[in-house]
Amino acid sequence: MTAQMLPAGLCEKSDCLEVKWRPPGGGTQYFGDLLIDRHIRNVGRGKVEVVQCSVTGFGILLGAALGFAAGARGQEPNNPPPTFTKNVAPILQKHCQTCHRPGEAAPFSLLSYEDARPWAVTIKMAVTQRIMPPWFADPQYGHFANERSLSADEIRTLVLWVNGGAQKGAAEDMPPAKPDFVEGWGIPAPDVVLTLPKPFPVPAAGVIDYQYVIVPTGFTEDKWVQMLEVRPTDRAVVHHIIAYLREPGSNYFKDQKPGVFFTAPPRKVDEKTDTSALPSDFLVGYAPGQPAEILHPGEGKLIKAGSDIVFEVHYTPNGKLTTDQTRLGLVFAKTLPKERVLTLSASNGTFKIPPGDPNYKVDATFEVRKDVRLVALHPHMHARGKSFEYRLVFPDGKKETILSVPVFNWHWQLWYNLTDPIDLPQGTKIECTAHFDNSANNPENPDPTKSVIWGQQSWDEMMVGFFNLEFDARMSSKELTAAEGAVHVH
Ligand code: HEC
């Protein structure tokens, strides 16, 4: 088929399985048909140029790319194609089902053959284009325990399965279902569930300020939690949630009544605002694609007796009147943890991104005050976020890049959990560098003609490098954080 321009998401040939296409303005070529719409959002709006449309050509190219002898449809001669029960189900269990099961983020389930079969061709495209599973770290830097990327072998198995007719296989080959899924949660059945006092009515349209509500834990003794998950009941209208901890005696929202929704007075952001310190009261957050927080045995987050949870929920209406009653589930540590985990951040609230700037750089630094260990990273930006990098600068001057997200996608706010925690001697600096694209070429940009500063709504920006530190459970968090004038980021 000769090159032609088609509106987003369309291929005119009815038997077409794969389209090779080029985004507006040229550049990278992509495969995909059903996926075009999404790529348009990611790569640039307008018309896409379809350069090839075929039922068969893809397998050859992919086969060559993955380095195996391939027939016309990427099939190895003399080898029976993989089957769902024997070869595919284990891959889906390992890499896909946390999201692709009822009640979770993905729009369809991949638990059974019957669930997965209609999606076979789309699965092939999504995994070969590495859209799925979502993962954005540059493999050059760092090793991450929760890395979801498929190996070349796993991709090949899925492709051969699809090319071979997406067969079911023998029932007895099916691996047992993953036992640790609890419907409605990404953690085991919680010991305690704290919910918004009542469903929040989300209108069909308009802009809603961040909603806050204080919910007392009622804990009469200190509690160590090992697993935490905060989640909406209607994901479609929730941009993000943060559950903050308010310890007894805290001044945070001290005049607000518990149990009622309120909005915070707007925080003035100007050149002098300093957010370089920390939200040391950050307990757990939710954003699309962000899984539950599951700490290792022996690690815990501390909730002191008499603490309150302050929920911050950002609702984004989507055309339908609805309600949401966000909830927080906690699984207590079975034994007293040796290590305490605390979420802190390096952030910068003083930037001003000029209109149209395609690559505006913002830096932030955090210096650790005690010997601690770094266990996880979580870059946070909004629609103009383009790339994000974390570096360590050790007291002896040694510098190391530990995470690079070269193409940031703000629809996926992921945590990157280090496979091996890194010792940070006192005086180590955690440096973060973000780049923002405020140009018209960024299809997510709500308005390239505006200067952009820190702010809460999604058309404002944020620059926060969250991270989890781990330290002796007997040390108080004050020792870690008291040194600088701590300013809340929220
Ligand atoms: C972290 C959660 C998550 C994981 C893990 C995940 N998915 Fe998805 N998947 C989603 C969501 C959410 C969507 C909806 C599209 C979107 O919003 O980007 C989706 C969409 C898809 C689509 C439709 C593609 C499209 O763009 O319309 C396919 C196919 C798919 N996933 C397959 C897989 C496979 C196969 C795996 C494992 C190898 C996997 N996913 C792992 C969350 C996930």
Image (cartoon, rainbow, N blue to C red):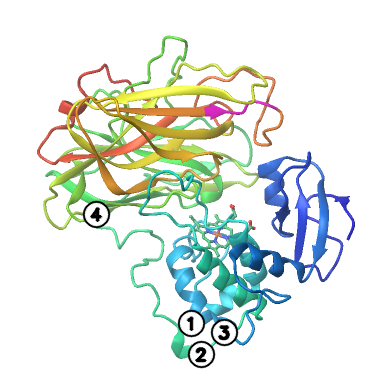
Label 4 near ligand 1 (CB < 8 Å): no
**Towards the viewer: 137 or 175:** 137
Name the spot of residue 108 as percent of width and height, x first. 57, 65
Name the residue type under label 4: His
**Residue marked by disc 2:** 170
Res. 423 visible in picture: yes
Q: Real-space Cα distance between discs 3 and 1?
A: 9 Å
- Mark 3 touches mark 1? (CB < 8 Å): no
Give the extent of the magenta segment.
Answer: 435-439
Residue 374 to residue 131: above or below: above
Residue 245's x, y, as percent? Answer: 27, 36
Q: Secondary structure at mark 2?
A: loop
User: Could you tell me which secondary element the residue under label 3 belongs to?
Assistant: loop
Residue displayed at 59% across by 82% down: 81
Q: 450 or 311, which is in the foreground?
A: 450
Disc nearer the start of the sequence (4/3): 3
Q: Nearer the viewer, mark 4 or mark 1?
A: 1
Left or right of 191 in this view: 41: right
Gap in angstroms between the C-alphas marked 1 and 2: 8 Å
Residue in the image at 32% along x and 20% along y: 487
Q: Residues within 10 Å of mark 3 (few under 14, many from 20)?
A: many
Q: Which numbered tag is attached to residue 86?
A: 1
Earlier residue among tags 3 and 1: 1
Q: Quadrant of the C terminus?
A: top left
Residue 127 place in picture, x, y as percent: 58, 61
Q: Position of residue 33 (x, y in %)?
A: 74, 59
